[in-house]
Image (cartoon, helix red, strand yellow):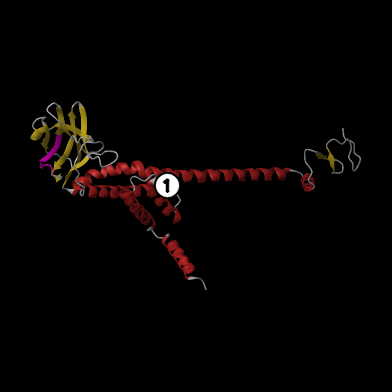
Amino acid sequence: MEPPGLRLQKYLKEQLKKFGKTPFVIPFAIGISAAVYYLVVLYGSGVCLIGLLTPLMLLGICWYFGIKSVKKLLLIGVLASLVFTGVLAATITDQYQHIEYKVGVSDDKNVTMTEGALQPLYGDKTTVYEYSVTVHVKNNATPVTEVEVVIQSVRFPSATSDTFSMTERSRQVLNNTTGEANVRYVYNTTLSTPVNVYWFLAKVSGDTLVAADYSTSPTSPLLGPMSKDTNAILGLMLPISLYQTFASVFPLYALIVVMIWWTRRTRKMRKDQMNKWEAERAKEDAKKPKEDAKVSLQRKAMGLDDEGTFVCSECGADVPAAATKCPKCGEKFE
C-alpha cells in the first residue's frame, strides 16, 4: 500500500493536469503574478533584483502548464502587464490617501529651518492651502534674503515645479540684545492637481538651506496636498502606472521569453545540422563499393590506420604503405 504522502502527491499531479486543460490557466497565472507584484510594490522597492520575481512567476506558471509558444507567451505578458498597471495604480492611490504627515526641517546643525508644514493635507481645487516654515535667525547680523516654497505638481509625462516667495508672518525674539529670533514665513495658494509634493528653501548668511524630509535616504520632498477625490488620484496614476509597467516589468518578461526562444532555436539548429551531417555521411557510405566497405570494416576491426596501409588490388589484403609487393599474393607495386 502506498504511503499517504505519495497518494496525495499523485492526486495533486492529476488535479493540476486536469486544471491545465481548462481555460482558467491563463487567468490563474496572471492572478498569482499580480498578487506577487502587489507584494513587490509594497515591500520590495529596496531589494536587489526583486523586479525579476513577477515576470519569472508569470513565465514559470505558464511553462508548467505547457504554454510554450512565444507568441502566446508575449500576448499573456501584455495582458498581465495591463493587470499589473491596475494593481500599481490602485496601490499608489491608496498610499496617497493614507500618507503620514511629516514636518520639514533643514540638515543644518544649528536647526536653521524647522516646522515646515502644510495645512490642510487633503482638499480640492477650491481649498486654500497654507505653507509655513520657521527660520532661526542667530542675531541681528544674520541676513535672510529669500525664503521660498517649491511646489511640484505630479503630472504625466513629467512633473512641473513652481517656486513661490513666502512672507513673514510673525517673529519670536529669543534674545533682545543679540536679536536672535524665530521668524515664521507663510504662503497661501490653491492647487488644481490631485497629487503634489513640496519643500522649502532659504538663503541664510549666503547659504541656501533646504527643509524637506531628512528621515529618508536620500532626502525626499514632503507629500501634499492630496485630493480628497480618490478617482482623481487614480485617474492620474493610471497613465503613470501604465508607463512604469511597460517600461520595467514587461521588458524583463519579454527578454526572458526571447532568450528561451533563442536557446531552443539554437539547439534545434544544431540538432538539424547534426542530422544533416549524418544523412550526408550515410549517402557517402552508400556510394562506396560493398567490397571496399567490407575491407574498410575489417581494417577498422583490426585497428589498422587508413593512412598507414592500403588494399592490394589483386587479393584485397592490407598492405603496409611502404611495401613494394603484396605479402600475400606477391603482386608488385610501382
Where's residue 36, x and y in %?
Answer: 35, 52
Where's residue 21, x and y in %?
Answer: 42, 60
Residue 285 placement, left or right of 65: right
At 26% from the left edge and 49% from the top edge, which residue is drawn?
91
Asked if residue 19 is positioned above or below residue 225 in the image, the reply reads below
Residue 236 placement, left or right of 45: left
Where's residue 158, x and y in %?
Answer: 25, 36
Viewer-proximal residue among 157 and 179: 179
Residue range of the region highlighted in magenta in the rendering: 124-135
Identify the residue under disc 1: 71
Viewer-proximal residue among 322 and 159: 159
Where's residue 148, x and y in %?
Answer: 16, 32
Quarter location, residue 324: top right
Going by the picture, which residue comes out furthest to the right? 330
Viewer-proximal residue among 124 and 267: 124
Which quadrant is home to the C terminus? top right
Residue 269 placement, left or right of 47: right
Q: Amino acid at mark 1?
A: Lys
Residue 244 visible, this orientation: yes
Mark 1 residue element: helix
Viewer-proximal residue among 156 and 47: 47
Going by the picture, which residue comes out furthest to the front? 177
